[in-house]
Amino acid sequence: MDFTTFLQQMINGFSLGSMYALIAIGYTMVYGVLRLINFAHGDIMMVGAFLVYLAHAAGLSFPAAVLVGVLGAILVGVLTDKVAYKPLREAPKISLLITAIGISFFLENLFNVLFGGVPRAFPAPDYLTQVIHIGKLYLPTTALVIPVVTLLILAGVLWVLYRTKYGMAIRALAFDIPTVKLMGINADGIISLVFALGSALAAVGGIFYAISYPSIDPLMGIIVGLKAFAAAVLGGIGSVTGAVLGGFILGFTEILVVAAFPDLGGYKDAFAFFFLILVLLFRPTGIMGEDLERGRF
Amino acid sequence: MLSVHSLEVYYGVIAAVRGVDIHVKQGTIVTLIGANGAGKTSTLNAIVNGVKKRGDVRFHDRNISRAKTHTIIRDGISLVPEGRHVFINLTVDENLRMGAFNNDTNFERLRDEMYALFPRLDGKRQQTAGTLSGGEQQMLAIARALMSEPRLLMLDEPSLGLAPKIVGELFGVITELKEKKGITILLVEQNAFAALKIADYGYVLENGSITLEGKGSELLGNDEVRKKYLGG
Ligand SMILES: Nc1ncnc2c1ncn2[C@@H]1O[C@H](COP(=O)(O)OP(=O)(O)OP(=O)(O)O)[C@@H](O)[C@H]1O
Ligand SMILES: [Mg+2]
């Protein structure tokens, strides 16, 4: 691998890592406050991307369609919690987990019934798919846009979590829900906020994914969702910085392994999980994780 | 100001509180004493609807029996829970911010007041609350509860696990809150002597029922109370 190829691959890894990181944050935040692996989270990402497609097909401009996708994903994410998870707050965690899997199947099949399972071309605008040449580097605009937008969003998320009272409430909620209520805080409102934030980020991740692999289908959230979940666990579930770190590590290693061993390209998904297993064997709580019983932000 | 009528709390089939009546007059300190498992914590939690309950709770002539916990707090009741429950992953400053969640405009003034009231916390503002000593955590829990400027402050065993000297300081502060700020106080304690000494009125809770009530000084002199709760 010469240097240009290496650089090219690093940039690709950065983009892929960005998507994993964006989606992983939602897994980790929901786990942090509810101790729930929200298996429907990958499908929220699909919903976001699909709504962009539908809104665009209905005649909206791409930016307006993106807004529809993000808002729609927020709505579906928050409603999922209100309708399916909230009644189970006091129930055993396993009931919650099974419900999440049910919601996942429901969303996948709902979109399958409504729109069919055939992959559809995603309407990425030219200014995002254009290829720029810098020396010997071939860069689609997205390779620059995705990491930059992601870093801005991540800075925003950390600002919310550490500098606003709502973020503090989210962090407090991860430890002690009854006491958060004693502060006069509507805990369910804060939980909705967590779902809203996570769903918005997932939608953005899903849109990036759809632009880069320019097609969408109702099942697109499964494997990407699983990998983002792996990233969250890798980083230490419950930790937002861990999720970001896990996302980027997974993105980079996946790209580099495929670049270094092109013959194994078909196994890249298997590789991501093999890598996860390996890390967990040596550090069961993930990179930033210290204590599996508690969420940390 | 606060009146509790026929309060009952059940955990499954276990009756923890069996028809309790409590009245707290504005501007007074009222204490609720009783042995382990008497139902003191359950009573306080039931007042803010932190546990399922039956019975009537009125605060300033408003029926809050069915109100949600966070709206009861917004109405002017604060509870310092048993075992402190400071947010151990947040800093001291952030804990105070959480106490003032619905009191943005007064946050900075109150925060400064709290550091003046509890000088031990000043200088630890950026420390995570989990690294504070037990006594400091108790002070933080009280300071946090005061950040919403409650009209009624309920404290659940604030002296638990504290050195006698610190307990003295703490009860001094509680008296000061009543006298200087006019905050009404409902104090749950196992340390019956210290509590009755500063209380205007007291209730004795046994197996979920009130067995005795009276002025603080009367209860201090009562033979039964002396035998059971004051060690002779
Ligand atoms: N969550 C719960 N589930 C089942 N039983 C409970 C629960 N909480 C309290 N109890 C029971 O209710 C009774 C009253 O408990 P409560 O905590 O109110 O007592 P307390 O007077 O505060 O005691 P202590 O002085 O030890 O704090 C006890 O018998 C206790 O075992
Ligand atoms: Mg108790």
Image (tube, coloured by chain):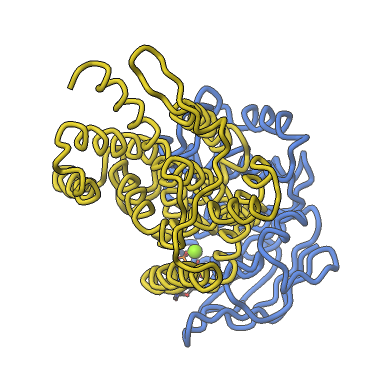
Q: Residue at 64% of width from left, 42% of height from top?
A: A62
Decide which of A291, B115 is in the foreground and name it. Answer: A291
Q: Is residue B211 above or below residue A78?
A: below
* Residue A239 placement, left or right of A197: left
Count of numbered badges drawn on the protein: 0
Decide which of B70, A14 is in the foreground and name it. Answer: A14
Q: Quadrant of the N terminus of chain A?
A: top left
Residue B142 makes an appearance in the image:
yes
Name of the residue lying farthest toward the bottom: B13
Name of the residue lying farthest toward the top: A135
Q: Is residue B69 above or below residue A4?
A: below
* Residue B61 placement, left or right of A72: right
Q: Indicate the position of residue A28 as horizontal and vertical percent values.
A: 41, 49
Q: Indicate the position of residue A156 as horizontal and vertical percent values.
A: 56, 32
Q: Residue at 20% of width from left, 18% of height from top?
A: A2
Indicate the colour of chain A: yellow
**In which quadrant of the rendered view does residue A244 lie?**
top left
Q: Quadrant of the C terminus of chain A?
A: top left
Indicate the colour of chain B: blue
